[in-house]
Image (cartoon, rainbow, N blue to C red):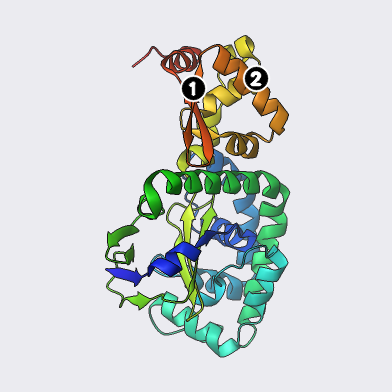
Amino acid sequence: MGWWEIDADTLARSRFVVSPLDETLACLKMLHFGVAGHPGERAWLDTHRPAHLRRVAADPVAALLVASGLGREWNADFLTPAPTEGHSFEEGLARVRATRPEEARADLAVSLGGTLPAVLDRDDLPERAAALLSDVWTDAVRPDWERRRRILEADVVARIARVSRGGWAAVLDTLRPGTRWLGGSRLQINLNPYPPRDLSGAELVLVPITAQRHGWVAWEEPEQYAVVYPCTGALVDGGARRVPAALGALLGPARAGVLTLLGTPMSTSQLVGVTGQGLGSVGRHLRVLLDARLVERRRAGRSVLYSRTAAGEVLVEAGRGRGPG
């Protein structure tokens, strides 16, 4: 298995970063493979994949670049620069564009797992990759970026709250399939037989994405390493947050939406991020739900988390037309 050695200082300095470039690459992967994780993603694919397929069909070099660079086992490294906190999509894209041509070709050969096709033996691969990512961002990600960003930030809040409850091991164990804290300063990053890496003195960032089920790892030795992981399912799946019509009629759509979300404990900040409602509105809804004993609250470190009570569960399930347990 592949694992990283992470000392206490590196772990203490690690942090979460929201990256529009990584979100765009995750969306490109979904467009390429055509696999959706839930109905919301299927609707997004149905809307955007036909245009993507037409784009790559009209450009055989771009089609082969995508097929070679987005391997099922490994992504071409130049497509996945370790993100920097606060960087815009354009700043991240500039790093892809600045890749040396020979480096891009070598990375593609690794992700392909064999000899690079002759059609990709060219110097404009970084520019072509940047142009393709820019198209995906412009057409399929940026129009929805504010909602995506709120979901990503809400996931970060949930992970930080989990650190306060169970420590870093509790968070690292659940980031992505194959990732597990082994103890003894070792983080398993996948099940592949790669040699271990020592991250002493490096920066470790954890990067949520909404559009891919497995995520990936990236690094720029020896300074920076990243684990890109899929958001918590409850925050990604629009279907899981759908408000039953009967419940909306009883409580009002916005308040019913808050109650529906609280099948998983969430903070006020998370609820603001996921719902897009203002802090004052969310606070009022929570007060009413608390007074009605449909939700309860408890402190987790510096966060206060809200969740449905048994009465709240019964009400949500009844609204969905299902009986309790």
- Point out the frontmost of discs 2 and 1: 1
Q: Is residue 319 left or right of residue 46?
A: left
Q: Which residue is mark 1?
A: 296
- Amino acid at the residue labelled 2: Pro
**Looking at the picture, how far across and down is residue 124, in whole percent?**
65, 83
Q: Is residue 76 visible?
A: no
Question: Which residue is rendered at x = 65% and y = 19% of the image?
Answer: 253
Binning the other alpha carbons within 10 Å of mark 1 as few (below 14), some (14 to 19) or many (20 upward) gives some
Question: Which residue is rendered at x = 50% and y = 75% of the image?
Answer: 77
Tell me where residue 242 sits by quadrant.
Answer: top right
Tell me where residue 247 sits by quadrant.
Answer: top right
Location of the C terminus by quadrant is: top left
Tell me where residue 87 sits by quadrant.
Answer: bottom right
Question: Which residue is rendered at x = 35% and y = 71% of the image?
Answer: 4
Please say if the residues under marks 2 and 1 sit with CB atoms less than 8 Å apart. no
Location of the N terminus by quadrant is: bottom left
What kind of element bears circle 2? helix
Q: Is residue 232 left or right of residue 280?
A: left
Q: Which residue is mark 2?
A: 253
- Asked if residue 56 is positioned above or below residue 174 in the image, the reply reads below
**Looking at the picture, how far across and down is residue 162, in whole percent?**
44, 45
| Residue in the foreground of this view, choosing between 175 and 114 | 175
Binning the other alpha carbons within 10 Å of mark 2 as few (below 14), some (14 to 19) or many (20 upward) gives some
First in sequence: mark 2 vs mark 1: 2
